[in-house]
Image (spheres, grey):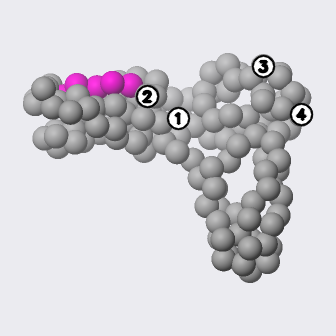
């Protein structure tokens, strides 16, 4: 049997805001608990669910095209042609933020709440709230 490798999904659920405090919710679909106020929110997006279910992924071992068949990520898949296994992982969402000091674009993973960032180019410290 071949080694299990990871392949990142091409689709990600859209970022959503908490209905109670309007801060960003953790990424994902379904019942999500706000990390800021603790409120429970239901996040759905039919187009994303359809895209995740119908996602076509090439097998990393033999390049045969497979259909994911589920909206769950991560999911372990096995290729029918070569019996190679791999894990289809969720897509990592990154946002682009401009540094107020030098206008450079920084790519960061969004997390609920307030974060302090330091620009690696000009060393300017600034806060971002999601």
For disc 2, the marked residue is 74
Task: Answer with the quarter of the image where residue 121 lies.
Answer: bottom right
**Could you give the CA–CA distance between mark 1 and mark 2, rounded to whole angstroms?**
15 Å
**Could you give the CA–CA distance between mark 4 and mark 3, rounded to whole angstroms?**
11 Å
Contact? badges 4 and 3 (CB < 8 Å): no
**Could you give the CA–CA distance between mark 1 and mark 4, rounded to whole angstroms?**
25 Å
In the image, residue 43 lies at what x, y percent?
A: 67, 27
Question: Dot 4 surroundings within 10 Å: few (below 14), some, or many (20 or more)?
Answer: few
Q: What residue is at 83 percent from the left and 22 percent from the top? A: 39
For disc 4, the marked residue is 21
For disc 1, the marked residue is 48
Contact? badges 1 and 3 (CB < 8 Å): no
Q: Earlier in the sequence, mark 1 or mark 3?
A: 3
Tag nearer the camera, 1 or 2: 2
| Residue 103 visible in the current orientation | no
Task: Answer with the quarter of the image where residue 21 lies.
Answer: top right
Helix, strand or loop at mark 3: strand
**Could you give the CA–CA distance between mark 2 and mark 3, rounded to whole angstroms?**
23 Å
Helix, strand or loop at mark 1: helix
Give the magenta part as a residue range.
75-79
Q: What residue is at 57 percent from the left and 37 percent from the top? A: 13
Q: What residue is at 73 percent from the left and 34 percent from the top? A: 25
Contact? badges 2 and 3 (CB < 8 Å): no
In the image, residue 33 lies at what x, y percent?
A: 74, 23
Tag nearer the camera, 2 or 4: 2
Within the magenta stretch, is there residue 48?
no
**Could you give the CA–CA distance between mark 1 and mark 3, rounded to whole angstroms?**
21 Å
In the image, residue 127 lies at what x, y percent?
A: 83, 58
Magenta span: helix, strand or loop, mainly? strand
Q: Quick one: 46 or 27, which is closer to the camera?
A: 27
For disc 3, the marked residue is 40
């Amino acid at each position: 049997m071949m080694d299990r490798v990871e392949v990142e999904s091409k689709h990600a659920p859209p970022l959503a805001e908490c209905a109670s405090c309007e801060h960003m919710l953790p990424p994902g679909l379904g019942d999500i608990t706000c990390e800021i106020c603790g409120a429970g929110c239901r996040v759905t997006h039919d187009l994303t669910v359809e895209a995740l279910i119908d996602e076509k992924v090439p097998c990393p071992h033999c390049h045969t095209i497979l259909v994911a068949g589920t909206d769950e990520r991560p999911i372990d898949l096995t290729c029918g042609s070569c019996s190679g296994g791999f894990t289809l992982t969720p897509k990592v969402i990154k946002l682009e933020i401009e540094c107020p000091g030098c206008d450079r674009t920084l790519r960061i993973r969004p997390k609920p709440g307030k974060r302090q960032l330091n620009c690696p180019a000009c060393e300017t410290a600034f806060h971002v709230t999601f």
